[in-house]
Image: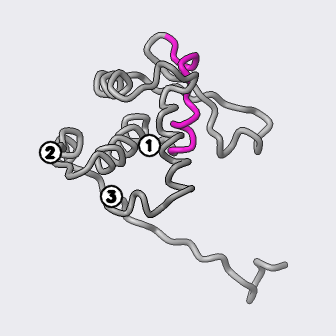
Amino acid sequence: MPNGKNKYIIKTYNTEKQIFSVDQVHRLMFFNAFDTKYQRNAYNHWKLCFLCNGSNMSDVLQFKWTDIEDDFISFVRQKTKNRTKNVRKLSIPIIRPLKELIEEIGNKESEYIFGGFRSASKELMRNPMAFRNL
């Protein structure tokens, strides 16, 4: 037995989680001191994930307009959709700051809510030096 007496024991770690204070969250949500449009774009990426309950960017980029119903965005996590038998949809309430961000940067010409981010990501892959001043 690999885990029996005098055998290998898998180590466990207790990590202390640090939580933002209400004031820190407020300052993050209303931060607006950007030097470039790329910094604002990066901030918007972060804010989207934050407002979507910490969703991965790979999930957020897959959100479609048809995923919105009754002030919720429902989706299946990309990370687990092909790894489990019982696929579970997650629902994120569209609170006012998220609604405002969707209205500001959502791409109505794409089936994906944040379809505009895709082209920026492709450009970055083609020419990383174009964004060196982020």
Residue placed under numbered mark 2 in the picture: 23
Q: Where 133 falls versus 13 (above or below)?
A: above
Q: Is residue 104 magenta?
A: no
The stretch in magenta equals 57-69
Residue nearest the viewer, comparing 131 with 71: 131
Determine the residue positioned at 68% across, 43% down: 80
Give the number of the disc on residue 134: 3
Residue 129 image offset from top left, x and y in percent: 44, 63
> Residue visible at 54% across and 23% down?
110
> Marks 1 and 2, how far apart in space?
19 Å
Instruction: Give whichever of 89, 117 is nearer the camera.
Output: 117
What SS does tag 2 mark? helix
Q: Nearer the viewer, mark 3 or mark 2?
A: 3
**In the structure shown, which secondary structural element does the residue marked by tag 1 occupy?**
loop
Asked if the residue at tag 1 contacts the one at tag 3, i.e. Cβ–Cβ closer than 8 Å, the answer is no
Query: From the image, which quarter does the C terminus lie in?
Result: bottom left
Q: Which residue is the site of mark 1? A: 54
Q: Residues within 10 Å of mark 2 (few under 14, many from 20)?
A: few
